[in-house]
Image: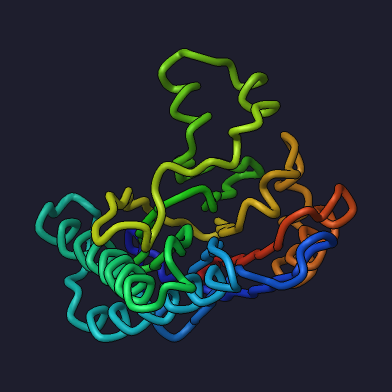
């Protein structure tokens, strides 16, 4: 893996916890250091259908990316539009395939009607992070001691904030703050937000469900991630549980290091 001429290596850890309130865990995740694909999905739907949706989405995206990643062109300095389009297209196509699969399963089984899942997908390729986003799980980049949210929440209250209808403070208290406006599986097609971001040695990536980020406060992520990814993952799970644990909690952490 190269980034602006620098050799990089990636290592990851993933953890999930049912939390303190839910009877079972409808989150699913993947941290695969062979193809450098990292996924977090937060399922929804009755009769454990959310669990089916999240796992099916993860499996489908993994299968598509595994088949396609070997033929991706190098990104070089990230200025070749054809190369950027190719990696973006693979990410978008994989998430769209998951959408079609989950929707089809729900159509065939009445007990799974309406099931869906969020998806925050991260593919590391040639020194760049390629993100695919649907729903309100999140991807953060921690660089030089500062955490940056790379993804946008597809929620009703976030739409209201962006439209200037309510403030961030009002959004945090809104009874509709968990209403999502996009999901994988509710329809045959979903709009996928895709970004391509350069990586550097020392970066850390956090992919998580809202069972974690719903409890995060400003300044929480940076000192915990600085402990190292294995300890940080456990600490983040504990933080969410200690602050209420009302939802399933899933964390995938990736560290970017210089190859020696």
Quadrant (top left, top right, bottom left, bottom right) of the N terminus? bottom left
Examine the image and state in which quarter residue 16 appears: bottom right
Q: Residue at x 19, y 62 (%)?
A: 89
Residue 120 position in % (x across, y down): 46, 59
Q: Residue at x 60, y 22 (%)?
A: 168
Q: In the picture provided, is 174 more to the left or to the right than 160?
A: right
Residue 64 position in % (x across, y down): 28, 80
Residue 150 position in % (x across, y down): 46, 45
Of residues 250 and 85, which is closer to you in this image?
250
Q: Residue at x 56, y 62 (%)?
A: 42
Q: Residue furthest left?
A: 82
* Residue 192 in sight in this render: yes
Of residues 56 and 46, which is closer to you in this image?
46
Of residues 232 and 57, which is closer to you in this image?
57
Examine the image and state in which quarter residue 232 appears: bottom right
Q: In the picture provided, is 250 more to the left or to the right than 73?
A: right
């Amino acid at each position: 893996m190269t980034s602006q001429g620098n050799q990089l290596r990636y290592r990851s850890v993933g953890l999930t916890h049912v939390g303190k309130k839910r009877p079972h865990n409808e989150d699913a995740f993947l941290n695969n250091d062979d193809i450098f694909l990292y996924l977090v999905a937060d399922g929804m739907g009755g009769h454990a259908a959310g669990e089916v949706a999240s796992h099916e989405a993860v499996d489908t995206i993994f299968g598509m990316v595994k088949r396609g990643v070997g033929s991706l062109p190098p990104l070089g300095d990230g200025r070749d539009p054809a190369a950027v389009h190719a990696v973006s297209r693979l990410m978008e196509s994989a998430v769209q395939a998951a959408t079609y699969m989950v929707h089809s399963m729900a159509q065939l089984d009445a007990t799974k009607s309406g099931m869906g899942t969020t998806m925050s997908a991260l593919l590391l390729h040639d020194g760049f992070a390629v993100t695919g986003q649907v729903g309100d799980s999140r991807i953060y980049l921690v660089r030089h001691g500062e955490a940056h949210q790379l993804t946008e929440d597809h929620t009703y209250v976030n739409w209201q904030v962006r439209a200037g209808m309510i403030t961030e403070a009002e959004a945090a208290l809104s009874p509709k703050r968990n209403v999502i406006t996009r999901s994988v599986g509710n329809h045959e097609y979903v709009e996928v937000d895709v970004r391509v971001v350069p990586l550097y040695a020392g970066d850390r990536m956090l992919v998580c469900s809202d069972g974690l980020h719903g409890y995060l406060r400003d300044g929480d992520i940076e000192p915990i991630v600085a402990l190292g990814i294995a300890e940080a993952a456990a600490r983040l799970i504990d933080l969410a549980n200690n602050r209420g644990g009302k939802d399933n909690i899933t964390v995938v952490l990736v560290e970017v290091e210089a190859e020696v």
